[in-house]
Image (cartoon, rainbow, N blue to C red):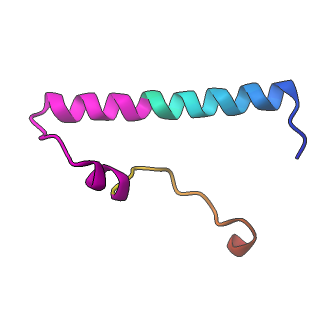
Amino acid sequence: MEWTPEAIKAEMDYRQEALREDARRVREYYRNGGKPRSWWHRMTHRHEPEVPAGPKAA
């Protein structure tokens, strides 16, 4: 895949939107009385979209 300026911008926009969504989810969690989680819990319980496993998905 060639990284054109348009592809780089699209990738940056995608990642920025994911960060914003994560921040929104965390704010909502705390606003609804959620308790702070340890760094280990945050690293092992990530909310990431399901992505096909490349060649294995076919």
Q: Horizontal placement of 56 versus 50: left or right?
A: right
Q: Main secondary structure of the magenta part?
A: helix
30 in the magenta segment:
yes
Q: Horizontal placement of 50 versus 57: left or right?
A: left
Q: Horizontal placement of 28 versus 48: left or right?
A: left
Pick the front one: 46 or 49: 46
In the rendered image, the vertical position of residue 37 relative to residue 16, given as above or below: below
Which quadrant would the C terminus be assigned to in this image? bottom right
In the image, which residues are magenta?
A: 21-44
Picture quadrant where residue 57 is located: bottom right
* Residue pictured at 63% horizontal, 26% vertical: 13
* Residue pictured at 58% horizontal, 34% vertical: 15
* Residue pictured at 70% horizontal, 74% vertical: 56
* Residue pictured at 21% horizontal, 36% vertical: 29
Picture quadrant where residue 7 is located: top right
Spot occupied by residue 52 in the image (x, y as percentages of width and height): 63, 62
Q: How many marks?
A: 0
Spot occupied by residue 5 in the image (x, y as percentages of width and height): 85, 25
Spot occupied by residue 35 in the image (x, y as percentages of width and height): 12, 41
Spot occupied by residue 38 in the image (x, y as percentages of width and height): 22, 49
